Image (spheres, helix red, strand yellow):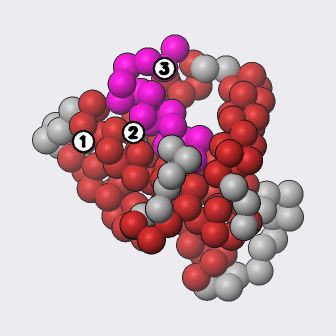
Amino acid sequence: MANIDVKNISDIETCDKDLQNLFKNLILGLVDFKSAKPTFTQTKNTALAELVERDKTDLETILTKASDIAIKKNNDYGSKNILKFGIIGIIVRIGDKISRYQNLVNNKTAQLVQDEKIEDTLLDIVNYATYGEMLSDGIWE
């Protein structure tokens, strides 16, 4: 994981399209949940690469920060929260975060929610994508 090559990671817009296609294919029964993992992995790696580029920080620091946030939020929400809507819910949550990120970055929109920075949005994408990987592998409890 520590050797992510930023130049070889697709951009957030591509991830958004891939997630939309995954959502449709899951709803239509064309793919199973296990086949969702590569899309989640690519999304996570894209968000991580963007964080490395934006923050000029090493991957270890970013992963530690993401893990700390995940532990705190899991404590607040409980692990059953993710199971309620499963992979479909994760896709929707990531889609919301990607939309927020795109709106703030691409449209140069003024950020009105001051207590959630762009970096926080990217960290949420990393964490949700990790949950998606875990659900795909059947290891979320």
Residue 34 among magenta residues: no
CA separation in Å, label 1 and label 2: 8 Å
In the rendered structure, which amino acid carries the disc numbered 3? Trp
Of circles 3 and 1, which is in front? 3
In the rendered structure, which amino acid carries the disc numbered 2? Ile
Cβ atoms under marks 3 and 2 closer than 8 Å: no
User: What residue range appears in magenta?
Assistant: 126-141
Which residue is the site of mark 1? 27
Closest to the observer, 126 or 73: 126
Looking at the image, the residue that sits furthest to the right is: 114
CA separation in Å, label 3 and label 1: 21 Å
Residue 84 location (% of width, % of height): 49, 25
Cβ atoms under marks 1 and 2 closer than 8 Å: yes
Which residue is the site of mark 2? 88
Magenta stretch: helix, strand or loop mostly: helix
Residue placed at 59% from the left, 41% from the top? 127
Residue placed at 18% from the left, 39% from the top? 31
The tag earlier along the polypeptide, 3 or 1, is: 1
Residue 140 location (% of width, % of height): 48, 20
Q: Using a 10 Å C-alpha cutoff, classify the residue at mark 3 as few (fewer than 14 neighbours), some (14 to 19) or many (20 or more).
A: some
Q: Using a 10 Å C-alpha cutoff, classify the residue at mark 1 as few (fewer than 14 neighbours), some (14 to 19) or many (20 or more).
A: few
Residue 137 among magenta residues: yes
Q: In the image, which disc is placed on residue 140?
A: 3
